[in-house]
Image: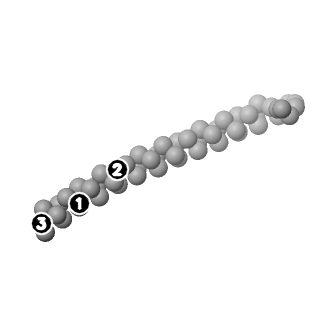
């Protein structure tokens, strides 16, 4: 099902590879930040309950 890319095969496939790697990296960073923010929010909520 792969089209014949001829002399551009390396450039096209490398571009796909880089794109997939960047999408994976952005997703991982986003998930890590979401976890960090959730922990910080839980800590803040616990402090607010303790003082309330």
> 9 left or right of 45?
right
Q: What numbered label is drawn on residue 18?
A: none
Q: Which is nearer the eye, 41 or 15?
A: 41
Q: What numbered label is drawn on residue 44?
A: 1
Colour pattern? one colour
CA gap, disc 1 and disc 2: 12 Å
Where's the C terminus, which quadrant? bottom left
Image quadrant in which you'd find residue 41: bottom left
Badge 2 or badge 3: first in the primary sequence: 2
Q: Count of labels shown? A: 3
In this rendering, the label closer to the viewer, 2 or 3: 3
The residue shown at (65%, 42%) is 19
Q: Secondary structure at mark 2?
A: helix
Q: Give residue 38's position: percent from left, percent from top.
A: 34, 54
Q: Which residue is mark 2?
A: 36
Q: Secondary structure at mark 1?
A: helix
Badge 3 or badge 1: first in the primary sequence: 1
Mark 1 burial class by Cα count in 10 Å: few <14, some 14-19, many 20+? few
> 48 left or right of 20?
left
Where's the N terminus, which quadrant? top right
Instruction: Using the image, determine if residue 46 lies above or below residue 21.
Output: below
Image quadrant in which you'd find residue 51: bottom left
Q: Give residue 21's position: percent from left, percent from top.
A: 59, 38
Q: Give residue 28's position: percent from left, percent from top.
A: 48, 43
Q: What numbered label is drawn on residue 51?
A: 3
Q: Secondary structure at mark 3?
A: helix
CA gap, disc 2 and disc 3: 23 Å
The residue shown at (40%, 52%) is 34
Image quadrant in which you'd find residue 7: top right
């Amino acid at each position: 099902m792969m089209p014949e890319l001829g002399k551009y095969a390396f450039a096209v496939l490398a571009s796909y590879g880089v794109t997939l790697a960047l999408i994976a990296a952005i997703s991982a960073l986003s998930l890590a930040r979401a976890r960090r923010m959730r922990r910080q929010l839980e800590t803040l909520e616990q402090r607010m309950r303790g003082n309330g």
